[in-house]
Amino acid sequence: MLRTNPGLLSFIEELYLNQSRKEDIILRTFSKGDQLLKQHQQISKILIIKEGVTKCYLTEENDKDYLFEFLGKGEIAGEIEALKNMDCLCTIEAITEVSVYALSIPFFLSQIDKNLEINKILLHILADRILNTSSRASYQQLYSIEHGLSKLLQLQQTEQISLTKDDMAAYLGISIRSLNRTLKQLTSKP
Amino acid sequence: MLRTNPGLLSFIEELYLNQSRKEDIILRTFSKGDQLLKQHQQISKILIIKEGVTKCYLTEENDKDYLFEFLGKGEIAGEIEALKNMDCLCTIEAITEVSVYALSIPFFLSQIDKNLEINKILLHILADRILNTSSRASYQQLYSIEHGLSKLLQLQQTEQISLTKDDMAAYLGISIRSLNRTLKQLTSKP
DNA sequence: GATGTTTCGGGACAAATGTCCTTTTTCCGG
DNA sequence: CCGGAAAAAGGACATTTGTCCCGAAACATC
């Protein structure tokens, strides 16, 4: 639900501190609501989240949002777009204060081209993401919306964040009306 | 819908012909209905499809199947499980006669460990798969079932295969009853 | 504090979908 | 060719979900 990757974070942290040029990896901060990457636009940097939580979503042609995941510490964004040289697939938006390590694209690609270790790390990241996406897709068939919703509510507790109802509905893939109904059920029953 | 990867196929073909030991990559054939990999079981080989079409699905605890994709020439299976050293996520089943290149797991992992080129190839494969899965997930929100269904029917025409209704329903994520209804609509209207 | 404006929740209805069960079709063995 | 079993199709109903819209609450303005 909230994805994190501590291993990648410490790896990048080290890269950041040891870099010779001081332009390959820079630190950036964003305020709540800022868009780190925008759907259909060219990416400017590859981002690794150092602190904070973002949401990753895409807006479909019918104006509905499809919210893929919440990204936390150590999660990476933009790497697929860089690899495939394509425009941004989805929008990454800060839902808390966020700080990130931003790698320049040439730097990232040159590393991919020659650094075996980074390749392996990235391979595992992408594999994890596939596992995550796949299991979520089937999860939404298997479990009831109640189940997903209560996990969302939990997430807000533990992370001390507050999601808008729009976000919750977009994540669960339902309308706000349905969300309200389910919320009412949840609060009355248990 | 039917995924293929001609580039990977010719790459493996070459590896196969040039291998020194004759056990790293072997050829295998399967009949329609055979299961190449089975969910929850350990994988024995990494497979690359040389010829034929398979379906990739997982059976949920409520006994419903979730059909991810149809895999054709050049598609790979088992690589994520090998990488993450885990049991098979889904079942791969032949829906036509199928022949595959089967790589031994130690061979595959040793290549990953030291061969930069294979790493890069795999990276692109996984990136493609993420793009594919993501766009399909949102696609199913955006487009009507009619749309997906007519694409399925087309696929059967062009590939000269015939899917069972169960498969079609599992792919579309609906019940057979719904599938029948939609089929009727499709045949009456246009 | 009254009034207008915006946001939010929920009622009412319609559409879509699943489940259950009956009817129809298909397929075999005799 | 017939009868019966098995598979497929479809009718009927219940449930879920979405859309539309109205009224209540929150907020701002004067």
Image: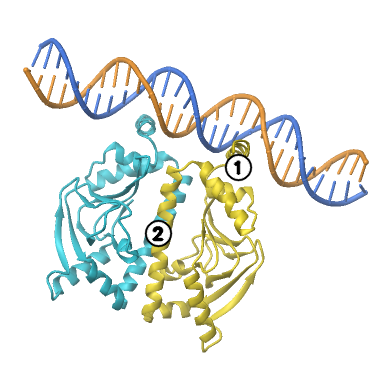
Chain colours: A cyan, B yellow, C blue, D orange
Give the residue drawn at x 25%, y 51%: A54
Q: Whole-percent x and y of residue D2? A: 91, 39
Q: Residues within 10 Å of mark 2 (few under 14, many from 20)?
A: many
Taking the view exactly as shown, the residue that stands out farthest to the front is B190
Left-right relation of B105 to B183: left
What label does residue A89 carry, if any? none
Label 2 – label 1 distance at C-alpha: 28 Å
Q: Residues within 10 Å of mark 1 (few under 14, many from 20)?
A: some
Does residue B189 sit above or below B81 in this rendering?
Answer: above
Q: Quadrant of the C terminus of chain B?
A: top right
Say which residue label 2 marks. Answer: B130
From the viewer's perspective, is A166 left or right of D4?
Answer: left
Seen from the viewer's position, the closer of residues A168 and D1 is: D1
Question: Residue B16, position in %: x, y?
Answer: 53, 81
In the rendered image, residue A68, in percent from the top left (x then y), is placed at 35, 50
Disc 2 secondary structure class: helix
Which amino acid lies under the numbered mark 2 shown in the image of this protein?
Ile
Q: Is residue A103 visible?
A: yes
Tag 1 residue = B176
Which residue is at a point 46% across and 77% down the rendered structure image? B108
The amino acid type, in three-letter code, at marker 1 is Ile
Chain letter of disc 1 in the image: B
Q: Nearer the viewer, residue B185 or B102?
A: B185
Q: Earlier in the sequence, mark 2 or mark 1?
A: 2
Chain letter of the residue carrying label 2: B
Is residue B62 shown to the viewer in this render?
A: no
Q: Secondary structure at mark 1?
A: helix
Left or right position of B83 against B3:
left
In the foreground, B13 or A185 = B13
